[in-house]
Image (cartoon, rainbow, N blue to C red):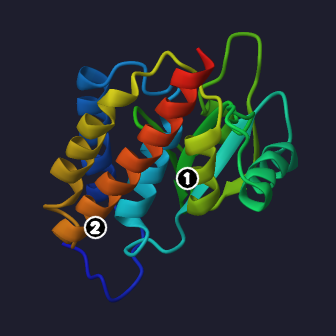
Amino acid sequence: MFSPSKPQTITKEFLIIIKNMQSDMLDEVHDLNYGGCGYFSLMFYNAIKDIYPEAKIVAFDSYETLEYYKDNINNVINNGHNGYLHDMAPSHLLVKIGKYYIDGYEYFTDTSDVPHQPGKRWTYIGEYSDHELEVALMYGNWNSDYDKSQNKEVLRIIDKYLSPNLPLRKSIIEKIGIKIRKIYKSNKAILDREY
C-alpha cells in the first residue's frame, strides 16, 4: 500500500485505518488521554516517522509555555535527575502529520477541536523531539489516571493496524516495545521511591 522509499501524504484510506485503530483504543485502553497521550504519541510517531517524515510530536497546554517544559527536560538531560519526578508533561500530546492532529482516540484538522479540560482551552505550544519526549516520560510527573501497564496493549493495537498497511519491519515494533518498557521501568522506580 505504501512505498517506504518516498514520503507519503495522508490518504482517505489511511485515515480509515487510523479511525479503526482509534476505535480499538477506545474499547480496549482506558484513560489513554489522561496520562497516556505521551506514550501513544511516542509509539505512534516511531512507527510512522520513516513513512511520514513530516510527522511531529506536538504539545497543547493552557498553563505553561513550551520553554518551561523544555527547560525542565534540558535540566535533567544536562544535570541528571535527582530522584524526583519533574514537571515535563503538557496538558496533551499528539502526532501531527500534514494538517492532521492524531491522538489515541481521535484525529482533528482544527486545533480548536483538540480535547481540553472543562473551562480551560488548550492551545498549541510547540513540538517535542522524540528524545525530549522519552526524557519527559521517564522523569516527568504525568497524570496517574492512565495505567501504564496498558502500553503493551497500545503497541499491540498500533502494530495490528499499521503493520499490514505500512512497510513496518517487526524490528521497529520490537525496538519501540523495548524503549517503552525502559521508560516505564524508570518512571515506576521514581514513583515507588516517592510514594
Residue 169's disc is: none
Rate crowding at label 1 as few (under 14), some (14 to 19) or many (20 or more) other CA atoms within 10 Å.
many
Q: CA distance from mark 1 to mark 2?
A: 16 Å
Image point (77%, 18%), residue name:
120
**Residue at the bottom extreme of this rendering:** 5
Q: Is residue 1 left or right of residue 60?
A: left
SS under mark 2: helix
Inspect the image, locate mark 1, and give the three-letter code of the amino acid beneath it.
Glu
Point out residue 93 in the picture as x, y percentages from the top left corner.
Answer: 59, 41
With respect to residue 50, does 27 lie above or below? above
Residue 141 or 62: which is nearer the viewer? 141
Residue 37 or 192: which is nearer the viewer? 192
Image point (41%, 49%), residue name:
182
With respect to residue 24, does 124 lie above or below? below
Q: Nearer the viewer, mark 1 or mark 2?
A: 1
Can the viewer see residue 166? yes
SS under mark 1: helix
Image point (56%, 43%), residue name:
138
Can the viewer see residue 12? no
Point out residue 114 in the picture as x, y percentages from the top left corner.
Answer: 61, 33
Residue to which mark 2 is pinned = 172
1 and 2 marks in contact (CB < 8 Å):
no
Q: Is residue 64 left or right of residue 52?
A: right
Q: Is residue 86 left or right of residue 15?
A: right
Residue to which mark 1 is pinned = 134
Image point (78%, 61%), residue name:
78
With respect to residue 52, does 158 lie above or below? above
Q: Quadrant of the C terminus?
A: top right
Inspect the image, locate mark 2, and give the three-letter code of the amino acid beneath it.
Ile
Residue 57 occupies which quadrant of the picture? bottom right
Q: Quadrant of the N terminus?
A: bottom left
